[in-house]
Amino acid sequence: MGALQRRLADFAAARHWQPFHTPKNLASALSVEASELLEIFQWLTPEESERVMADPGTAHRVADEVADVLAYLLQFSAAVGVDPLAALAAKIERNEERFPVRGPAGA
Amino acid sequence: MGALQRRLADFAAARHWQPFHTPKNLASALSVEASELLEIFQWLTPEESERVMADPGTAHRVADEVADVLAYLLQFSAAVGVDPLAALAAKIERNEERFPVRGPAGA
Amino acid sequence: MGALQRRLADFAAARHWQPFHTPKNLASALSVEASELLEIFQWLTPEESERVMADPGTAHRVADEVADVLAYLLQFSAAVGVDPLAALAAKIERNEERFPVRGPAGA
Amino acid sequence: MGALQRRLADFAAARHWQPFHTPKNLASALSVEASELLEIFQWLTPEESERVMADPGTAHRVADEVADVLAYLLQFSAAVGVDPLAALAAKIERNEERFPVRGPAGA
């Protein structure tokens, strides 16, 4: 993931895009890309949404939007100095305490 | 990232949340979390957005929302069978052709 | 709707909020509020979503988010000088041509 | 606004789109359209965002997205039985109490 983050940084630097890449703008772009992914699903039933990858054109579109969301998430994280994997590991720990698994009665 | 993906899957399975985790619902949740990240920035100037991590409370909130976005991106990707790192690598290749770097005149 | 737009403008002016109300920021806020409305529905089945107003607490939350979306839509529209009702009427005309109703064969 | 709401309902009915128009799907579509409006602004400075209507092509795009957001807001509101103008009027009342205007010291 660090390697991809560097490639994204080099890509933006080579095109002089850094002035546009404020944390605010990257958060907007991340949200816009997440919505483009949602757009693929907006009229589907739950069952249709499970079969979304059966159509090659739609499957490509889904993979492409996943890539866009990850690209902006990595660029945003680099811009604010957050390690997304560490942040997620910490969050899972907290959630394991917040939502304890209920064992069977008498356990 | 694979390890986190497994922990997220175990976490959801232990709480019997899988029936809710259709691709459609996970795409909605991803979009909602990306908006919660954007909410932190919505009234900030570009300059204020650059300093967002200076306040410990806001910094924690930012890291927390990054974790939530990554969590749903990984869960969505697992649900549809997309490898997000491979999808991003392929996208960067395509973008390098789509947005060529212009060299100096005469180069 | 004009009367509400004026009340919103007076409300913001009395609190000196206009400097924050750039078109960009208002578009962000509109998108964030639309996501808060979506959040209410993200784990519901289509059938559960049809019954969302049966619970008074959820019904209040839905109405509240509708109000927030309309508030930012009106404030955004005022900031850029668009009349939303006229824009929608024009769009419906265009869509009636773009998506013609197919009559029965032989009609 | 009631007249537009009826035209939208007739438009959807004539195309047999009602089965797709669950509250959940309409909330998704509303959120997707709000993001398309935000997309126009994502890389602009606050100052550029103030001048967004100076370009006729962009001005048309802005008006078009405003129309889409209003269309889904009205269709969502009809689907759940909320009057958006009444909801906003009630919200403004509550906000006037929640965010009182501070008078000058000694007033």
Image: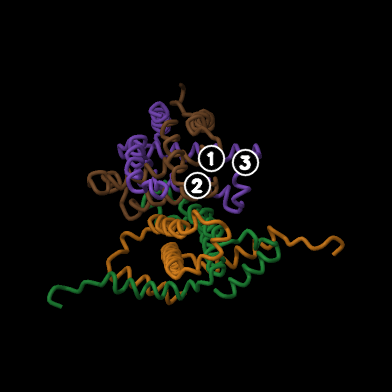
Chain colours: A green, B orange, C brown, D purple
Mark 1: secondary structure = helix
Mark 3: secondary structure = helix
- Taking the spot 47% from the left edge, 51% from the top edge, the residue there is A40
Residue at the farthest top position? C107
Image side of residue D71 versus residue D38, left or right = left
**Disc 1 crowd, CA 10 A, few/some/many (<14, 14-19, 20+):** some
Residue B78 makes an appearance in the image: no
Q: Give the image location of residue B91, x and y in percent.
A: 60, 63
A51, D9: nearer the viewer: D9
* Mark 3 vs 2: CB contact within 8 A: no
Labels 1 and 2: the sequence-earlier one: 2
* Mark 1 vs 3: CB contact within 8 A: no
Residue type, label 3:
Thr
Do marks 1 and 2 share a chain? yes
Q: Quadrant of the N terminus of chain A?
A: bottom right
Question: Which label was assigned to residue D58?
Answer: 3
**Disc 2 crowd, CA 10 A, few/some/many (<14, 14-19, 20+):** many
Residue behind mark 1:
C79
- Taking the spot 41% from the left edge, 56% from the top edge, the residue there is B32
Residue behind mark 2:
C26
- Taking the spot 50% from the left edge, 47% from the top edge, the residue there is C26
Question: Which label was assigned to residue A103?
Answer: none
Mark 2: secondary structure = helix
Residue type, label 2:
Leu
* Mark 1 vs 2: CB contact within 8 A: yes
Quadrant assignment, res A68: bottom right
Find the distance from the CA under tag 1 to the CA under tag 3.
15 Å
Do marks 3 and 2 share a chain? no
**Disc 3 crowd, CA 10 A, few/some/many (<14, 14-19, 20+):** few
